[in-house]
Structure formats: structure tokens, C-alpha cells
Image (tube, rainbow, N blue to C red):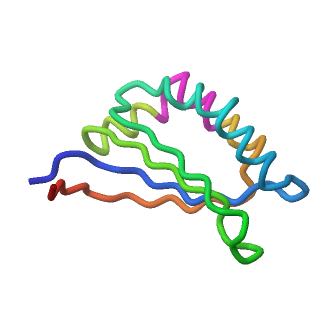
Amino acid sequence: MIELIKVVTLSNRKPGMSHEEFAEYWLRIHAPKAKKLPGLRKYTINVLSSEGEEGAYDGLAELWFDDMDAWKRALESPEGREAGKDGDNFVGKMLLLYAEEHKII
């Protein structure tokens, strides 16, 4: 049984921004905006180790919604537009993935 839709973002920092600056901005400035998305059930940020190869992703986020319609409504909301615009302040490149989450344990 499909329980939730998970949106996974893999993100790289903007050119000229350090890994530490990226993580600090994401956690302290962006996350408080993103967590206000209507319909958001769960939100996690995973800051990847700066020990990875250059050009690898700096972090990934997981956002859970009831379904794709809830995700689309969240993006179109004032909160979604604000969070999307704010992403331009620290994200250089982003890969967006959609997953149907199946809880096993």
C-alpha cells in the first residue's frame, strides 16, 4: 500500500559558496521557510560529507506529502513560491526525484 509521496531533492551549492556556507544557509534560513509548505507531512535535510569528490552533491532533502496533488498545491502556495525563490540564494544545481514510499518496518 502506498502511504505517501516522497519528493527527494539532490542539491549542489552555488558557485563560490563553501560547503559550510551552503549547509548553514539551508538549515538556518531556508528550512524554516520550507517547513511551512501546506500539506507537508515530514521534512528531512541530509547534509552530505564535504569529504566527497568535488562536484558531488552537497545535500539531499526529503519531503513527504499525501499525494502528487498535495505537492503541486504546496508549490503553488505563497509559502511554496517563497521557498522556491529562496532556493536560488544557495542552490546551484538540483535534481528532483519523486518516490512512492512503502513502509516495510
- Direction bottom: furthest residue: 53
Is residue 21 part of the magenta span, yes or no?
no
* Image coordinates for residue 7, horizontal then vertical, percent: 41, 51
Image quarter of residue 70: top left
- Direction left: furthest residue: 1
In front of the other: 80 or 49: 49
Q: Is residue 28 left or right of residue 98?
A: right
Q: Is residue 81 left or right of residue 97?
A: right
In front of the other: 81 or 46: 46
Q: Is residue 34 above or below residue 20?
A: above
Task: Tell me which secondary structure the magenta stretch mostly adopts.
Answer: helix
Q: Is residue 58 left or right of residue 37?
A: right
- Direction right: furthest residue: 16
Q: Residue at x 70, y 30 (%)?
A: 29
Which span of residues is magenta-colored?
75-84
* Image coordinates for residue 41, horizontal then vertical, percent: 33, 33
Is residue 78 part of the magenta span, yes or no?
yes
In front of the other: 11 or 49: 49
Classify the position of the C terminus by image quarter.
bottom left
* Image coordinates for residue 89, horizontal then vertical, percent: 78, 41
Classify the position of the N terminus by image quarter.
bottom left
Q: Residue at x 26, y 57 (%)?
A: 100
